[in-house]
Image (cartoon, grey):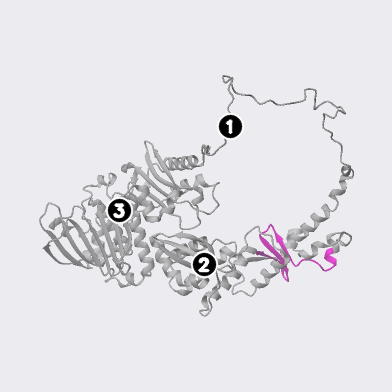
Amino acid sequence: MSDIIQLLPDSVANQIAAGEVIQRPASVVKELMENAVDAGATKIDVKVLDAGRTLIQVVDNGKGMSETDARLAFERHATSKIRKAADLFELHTMGFRGEALASIAAVAQVKLKTKRPEDSIGTSLSISGYKFEGQEPVTCPDGSNFMIENLFFNVPARRKFLKSNTTETSNIIEAFERIALVNPEIEFTLTSDNTEVLVLSQASLRQRIIDIFGKRLNQDLLPVNVETTMCRITGFTGKPESAKKKSAKQYFFVNGRFMRHPYFHKAVMTPYERIIPEGEQIPYFLYLEVNPQDIDVNIHPTKTEIKFENESAIWQILMASVKESVGKFSEVPSIDFNTESAPDLPIFSDDADDVEVPHVEYNADYNPFAQTSSTAAPSFTPHKSAEGWEKMYDGLEKDSELRQMDLFGQSEEEEDIPDEEAPLNRTEELSSGKTPTHFQYKGKYIMTTVKSGLMIIDQHRAHMRILYDQFLRELQDEQRVCERQIVLFPEVIHFSPEDILTVDKLMPQLQRMGFDLSPLGNGSYSITAVPAGLNGVNAKNVIEDVVADARKEIPSGNESIWHIIALEMARKSSVSEGELLSNTEMESIVNELFVCSNVNYTPDKKPILCILKEEEIENLLN
């Protein structure tokens, strides 16, 4: 019987490896930018076409490669970053495995032009699907110029299941931002479909954050700076008022490498637990410098998971540093009095003989504590109406009873019952047939009787379902244009570069719902109109949450976009928990709920109601 185990060809092995290393176009951008940073570049330009499907080009002015190095760089596990296993514990570069270029070459058509400063001429080579096509001398500037064309051309399943251009471009921008945030000393340019998305010059860390996410974030940043023998933590965390439920910018970097760490995220959020609403998030940009021997980044090909030797201790240091920054911000500032245009008040001094001290006349014989009929003492004669003061509280008990009855659903018209006609007790009211049909419990639940028992309805979720169906019908009706209300004082809203792509995609639907956004440039928009009837709702928060949900849920068509907009508007417009409702309002919610498309669940799959059966009630009471 012949042997059945054999070595895989390099082309097959590289395609298998590429499945983990190169997951989407953003992975190519990340790997090539990290190589450019490791090459000592001071200027990196990134250009993408068709969300990276057609072209990804990364140009840097780093140290370049020789003719031999350029050819060897595309071999699997070929790297200039490490020499032996011990170097894994002293990493000072972004890459070290030697898998990135080999994986890219296995699933794309690659052209490279590179030249070292000391060489008079550079080299150019072409690789397609890991097949070497040729190499020749070429004139080119110092550094490297990678052109990745037709990504996944030989892996049709992977190419087919790439997301929309908007989503993939958004992922590319996010990968670009992560590297730009940790290298403020490098100039970066990102161009998408011949449009400049980000142009970043050399700057301080704070300025780099502002350049990417907008000037408005500047006023929300609190500096963090602590240094211990175990680690050094620098960067910025947000002020409590910068908290938001969605799309908060949160970044961890360890030794210049982006990291996801839910445990450390908890350390950052702990100091804010009692000063921001539950469920909201704070933006932060935190940079940790740790001894490379105390961490392990060789966990996953994406290198976003890092293990720490002293994780608990660093958690405590991180929490304390953030708490200190928030505490300094919360200190009461000193008060500077403005003395301009203030009246000139005389200052009396013992040394000033020429100052005339004002004379105050007083009655030396007056004693306020002496019981005397002297006219010098004030007279406290009881007011005649003080007698029989108990009558002032007549009727309060009845008023209190009436108000309590209203909480159980009694209509406002029944509050004006004359005293002599007021119900004597609850039993008489029930027997009279005036029992309210619905009751409200703790301002959160509507309780009503049904044939099988007691139905309990969450008023917020029920109203959300009602409004969602209403908004969705308006969006689906192409002939209908919602009424809009012009804003007297337009509010300015700012979006990050990846959010702008989503806003452009959502703009037609937002306008149909009644929102009007006027672009101001640099990612800023002015909200000049809102849907009529959106009273008491912050239009800015609605739009921000719609954009955040659209990025998260990746809408693929109009139906998906309509769902996101209708759901977010319904969330913001529906009655809140703790809001007291009259019996008429509760009746309206119940009636409208039972004509909705789905009575049992909200659009985000949360239960709306439950029924406590009569048998269960009897078992509880027996």
Q: Secondary structure at mark 1?
A: loop
Picture coordinates of residue 122, whole percent (x, y): 13, 59
Residue 97 makes an appearance in the image: no
Would residue 71 be found to the left or right of residue 271 on screen?
A: left
* Residue at point 37%, 40% (across, down): 231
Q: Residues within 10 Å of mark 3 (few under 14, many from 20)?
A: some
Q: Residues within 10 Å of mark 2 (few under 14, many from 20)?
A: many
Picture coordinates of residue 431, whole percent (x, y): 85, 66
The tag on residue 201 is 3
* Residue at point 73%, 71% (across, down): 451
Q: Residues within 10 Å of mark 1 (few under 14, many from 20)?
A: few
Circles 1 and 3: CB atoms closer than 8 Å: no
Q: Nearer the viewer, residue 415 or 369?
A: 369
Q: Which residues are magenta?
A: 429-458
Instruction: Report which quarter residue 76 is drawn in.
Output: bottom left
Q: Nearer the viewer, residue 247 or 73?
A: 247
Q: Secondary structure at mark 2?
A: strand
Q: Tell whether position 442 is magenta.
A: yes
Q: Earlier in the sequence, mark 1 or mark 3?
A: 3
Front tag of 1 and 2: 1
Would residue 65 be found to the left or right of residue 275 on screen?
A: left
* Residue at point 85%, 30% (across, down): 375
The residue labelled by disc 1 is 345
Would residue 215 be found to the left or right of residue 277 on screen?
A: left
Q: Amino acid at mark 1?
A: Leu
The residue labelled by disc 2 is 529
Q: Nearer the viewer, residue 424 or 4?
A: 424
Instruction: Report which quarter residue 1 is drawn in.
Output: bottom left
Would residue 300 be found to the left or right of residue 364 on screen?
A: left
Q: Amino acid at mark 2?
A: Ala
